[in-house]
Amino acid sequence: MNKKFAAIMLTLLLTVTVVLSGCAKKEEPKAAMTNAATNAMKMTSYEMKSKFVIEDLQVNIPAVEGDPSVTQAMTMLKNAEVTLDGIYQAEPMQTEMNMGINLKGDMAMSFNIDMVMTKEKIYVKIPSIPMLPFPEDVVGKFLVMDMKELAEQSGETFNPETLDTEKSQKFVNEILEAVLSEYDQAKYFKEINVKDAGLPEGVDAKQVVQFFVTNDNLNEALDIMVNKVAPKVVDIAAKDEYRELLGLTQEDIDAAKAEVSNVNQDEFKAGLEEVQKYLKINTFNINTAIDKKDFPAYQDVVLNVDFNDPETKENVKLAVKGSTQYNNINAKQEFKIGIPKDADVITMEQFEESMSQMSTY
């Protein structure tokens, strides 16, 4: 191999190396999260697994202390778990989800609800729930709801613009950029070592970014949200291309603009001081795992707060965790439920008739 050819090959090799490393390079935390949020709007199909758990719930309110219904509700909700597994595609628009609900305590119960959505219809599979018995002839059937008919029944006009996925993605993207742009990287963002992020199996992340709020930056975070982010959000919603999407009138926009531009700053600051007295943020983190294609492949939220009012002696403790994992992004999806067949579907009128017959027994 002559020296000239060797030099060319070396140059090509270095060029390819630079390009590949650039494709998977890490960005500054805030920029990485902003970029991932933008790319999330480019997800035209995906599988999703979400989980939400109430790890702790303690409510000490003298006015309702000893009330058995309140005690029972708190027992059921503590450690309650909600899961949501779904598949989505933009064209043709189709979504299916399985929601699992698992309640604890003396009245413990678990049940699942299957749902299917198309551009014009929603199908909900009627579950078997011990505390809420449905007639046997409807359990397992899919209750179909036509969104156009529902709009007409409520005296409104069905607006297909509200189901414009591409426009919705663009709108959400602008909102996310408006929110993230106002928060300082040094105060609200940091990078987490991928190995220390506790990512589930199957998540291949190049970078994990955390957005966090603490007692130290809570007041500033709320101030930014009210005085900087909110006006931006209203301006975005006021654009002609989004007003019809959101079903807003000019009167709605004018009222919102007046509200966000006329915040009484003295009252607002006094309210922030009150919040600081009673609210303690033990943890509020949102971790986003970004894959090699810059998609947010996984996200988890941890919230642990205490509320204590020394005057009323009211104390509330809440600890929740939630996570969402995306797989098979922008690939062909295989739906498990599919569009329910006519034999498995009942209308709202049929459902109501069956329920009325049950009530007569």
Image (cartoon, grey):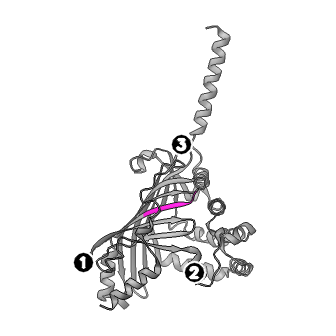
Element on which disc 2 rests: helix
> How many angstroms separate mark 3 from mark 1 (CA)?
46 Å
Q: Quadrant of residue 64?
A: bottom left
* Placement of 67 over or under 230, stated as above or below: below
Q: Are marks 3 and 2 in contact (CB under 8 Å)?
A: no
Query: Residue 349: where, in percent of width, then height?
Result: 46, 82
Q: Does residue 48 appear to the left or right of 293 in the view shown?
A: left
Q: Quadrant of the C terminus?
A: bottom left
User: Residue 32 versus residue 348: which sits nearer the camera?
Assistant: 348
> In the rendered image, which residue does mark 3 sit on?
292
Q: Give the percent coordinates (x, y) of residue 105.
A: 26, 75
Q: Split into 4 quadrants, where in the image is the N terminus?
A: top right
Against 68, is 332 above or below? above
Amino acid on which disc 2 is placed: Gly
> Element at badge 1?
loop
Who comes first in sequence, dot 2 or dot 1? 1
Label 1: few (<14), some (14–19) or many (≥20) C-alpha neighbours in 10 Å = few
Instruction: Read off the residue under disc 1.
Output: 106
Residue of label 2:
271
When the figure is inspected, residue 310 is found, relative to residue 186, above or below; the finding is below
**Amino acid type at mark 1:** Asp
Q: Specify the segment rendered in magenta.
A: 92-97
Residue ranking furthest to the top: 2
Q: Amino acid at mark 3?
A: Lys
User: Residue 188: x percent and y percent?
Assistant: 56, 59
Residue at the spot 75% in from the left edge and 69% down from the top edge = 240
Q: Nearer the viewer, residue 130 or 108?
A: 130
